[in-house]
Amino acid sequence: MGANTSQVSDLSENPSLKALVGTQSISENDPFWNQLISFTFISPTSSGDSKLLEEAVIPLAKTLIENNPRTGNFGALVRVFLGRTKELKISTECQDQLFIWQAHNALFMIRCLLKVFIREMSEAELHLQLSYQERALGSCGGGSEDLLEELLSNLIHLIVEVPQLDITYSILFEAVTTLLVFFSYQLFHKDILRDGPIYQHIMKGRCLSLTSRLVKTLLYNFIRQEKCPPPTHIFEPKAEGGLLYGLASGVASGLWTVFTLGGAGSKVATDQEQNPLPLSNQSLLLLLVLANLTDGPDWPNPYRQAIASFRNTQDTSSSSAEQPHTFQINFNSLYTALCEQQRSDQATLLLYTLLHQNANMRTYMLSRTDMDNLVLPILEILYHVEDRNSHHVYMALIILLILTEDDAFNRSIHEVVLKNVSWYSERTLTEISLGSLLILVVIRTIQFNMTRTRDKYLHTNCLAALANMSAQFRCLHQYAFVCFVSKKHNKVLEQATQSLRGRQGENAALPDYAQDLNVIEEVIRMMLEIINSCLCSSLHHNPNLVYALLYKRELFEQFRTHPSFQDIMQNLDTVIGFFSQRLEQAGSDLSVERVQEVIMKGAQALPTDRLKKFPELKFKYVEEDQPEDFFIPYVWSLVFNSGVGLHWSPHGIELFSMDSG
C-alpha cells in the first residue's frame, strides 16, 4: 500500500462518508455527490490491500444498512453512477478524463459497499435496499424502475461499449470486478444457486440481448493481455492533502486522500508485478463464472451457448441454422493467448471449456501445425504434478484426452521434433518427438499416482489418452519404452499384493488394500493393452518397443500366471519368442547395432495373423452428470484465490473447503 496506510482507519470518521451512511437523505442532485466522488487513488490490486480496505468499510456499510431504509442514500449513489454511465462513451471519445474519473470512483464505492452487503444480507434483502426511494426534497428519483436490473444492465453496457484505453482501463476493470462481486453470493452457499434476482436479470431480461457482446468482449480482454497503465492523477494533491477540484464546487473533501493505494510504497510495485494484467485476469474469471451458471428450468445458459457457438473471423460460410448468441472472433489471437497463459488454472479451464464445448475452436486447434506451442505447456503442468492442485492436473489431463480422440493429432505429434525441453530434469532430452515426450510425461504421472495418491480418476484419464494414441505410435524415443516396462509397476503390484495377503492372514478388514490392488491391476492391465495395440498396429514403426520388451523380459514373468493378464500376455509372449529366436539364429555377442538390425528385419517378417485380435482401444471424454457440482466450486475457488484486488474472509465460505484444490 501507499505511504498513508496507517490512516485507513480514518475513513470511519470522515464527514462525507458519515453523511452518506447517516440518517439524512441526500438528493441525487445535491452537490454533495460531486464532492464525494472526487478523490484520487489507485484501486487495490492485492488481497492484503483489499482486506485492509474492507475492514475499514465494514462499519460504514453496516451503518448504511441500518439507515438506508429511511434515507435511500445507497440507491441515490447508484443513480449518480448510472447518470454518468450514459455519457461514458462520449466522454471517452472526447478524452474527458474528469467524467470517467468520477464515474469510476462512484462505481468503486458501490462495489466496496456491495461486497459487505452481500456478506450481510440475502439477495432479496439487497434488492430491497436498492428499492428504497429518496425522501429528500428536490429529489428527481421516485421512479418504479428495478434499480438492481438497471445497475447490472449498465455495467454490461459499460464493458461492451466503452473502448479499452489508458483512461478507461480502471473503470472497465471496476465494472468487471463489480459483476464478480454480485455473483459472489455463491461463495456463501453450499448448494448451487439456481435462481434469485441477480441470476434472473443476468440470464433473462434486458441483459440477455447483450450476451454475445459481453462474451466476445471478455474474450478479447483476455486475448489482449493489456498491462495496467501507470496511474495518472487528474488533479495533483495540495500540500495539506486536499484535492483541487477545479469546478464550481470549489475544494473537494479529500476524503480518500488518506487512502491513496499505490502512492509511494514498494509493496504496490510488487503486487502489480504479480498481477500485471488485472483486466485480463478478471475478465477471464467473470467469463468462467458466466459459462458455469446453471441452466434455467425452461432456458439454457445463454453465455454457455455463446461460448459453444462462436466462429472464426476468417470463416465466411453462412450457417442456415444459426446458433443463438453466436459471434465471430479471431481464432489465431485466441489460440496464441491460450498457449501463452497456461501457467494459470483459469486459462487451462478456458482451454478445456473451448475444446469440449466449441466444435469450431476444437477443429481449428487440431488443424494447427504448431500444436507443440499448446501441448508443451499442458505437459509442463503434468510434469510438475506435485506442485499443482489436483483440479489443474485434471483439466490438463482431460485436455490431452480430448486431443487424443483425433487420429490426425496422434500421428502429427510424432512428426514434431523438439531439440531441448528445459523443464524436463530427469535426464537430458536433446532430441525427442512431441509424441514421445507426451508419453513420458503421462507415464510419469501414472507412476506418481500409483505410488502416492492412487487416484482412480487420474490414472483412468492418463491411460485413456495413451490408449487413444497407441495405434499411431511412431518411432518412439527409447527412453519412452523403457518407462513403459518400468520396474516401478511390478514393484508396486508386488508390494500391494503382499500387503493384501498379510492383511488376509490377520483376518482384518480389506477395503483399502483391496481397492489399492484393484487400481494397480487396472493400470498394469491397460499398460499391457497399450503395448499390445502398438504391436498389432505399428510394430514395424517401433523397433525400440521390441528392444525394450526383450531387454526387460524378466519383468513380465509374474504377469503370465496372473489371472488378470494371461490373455493379453499371449501376444507379448508371441513377439518376445519370435524375436528371441531370430536373435539366437543371428549368433551370440551381438552389438546393439546388430540387435537393432535384426529387430528391424524381423518386424517386417512377423506374420500379423499370429497376433490375437483385441477390440480397438478408443476412449472419449464425456462430462459426468451434473458437472456444475465440480465446476462451480472450482471456478469460485479460482476467483477466491486469484481475483485481483479481491479479498474474502474464509470464515463463512460454504461452497468449498479452504484446503480443497
Image (cartoon, grey):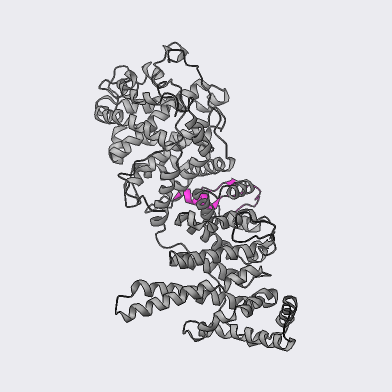
Residue ID at (47%, 48%): 288
Using the image as rendered, state which of residue 413 and residue 173 is in the foreground.
413
Q: Which one is in front, 351 or 498?
A: 498
**Horizontal and vertical percent for residue 652?**
30, 45
- Residue drawn at (67%, 65%), measured in percent from left and top? 414
In the image, residue 360 lies in the stretch drawn in magenta:
no
The image position of residue 120, as x and y in percent, is 28, 38
**Quadrant of image for the N terminus:** top left
Is residue 181 visible to us here?
A: yes
* Identity of the residue drawn at 62% across and 71% down: 481
Q: For the point 48% across and 67% down, which residue is it? A: 459
Find the residue positioned furthest to the front: 589
Q: Work out whether residue 145 can be spotted.
A: no
Above-or-below relation of 384 to 83: below
Which residues, given as a range, are shown in magenta? 301-328
Q: Main secondary structure of the magenta part?
A: loop
306 drawn magenta: yes
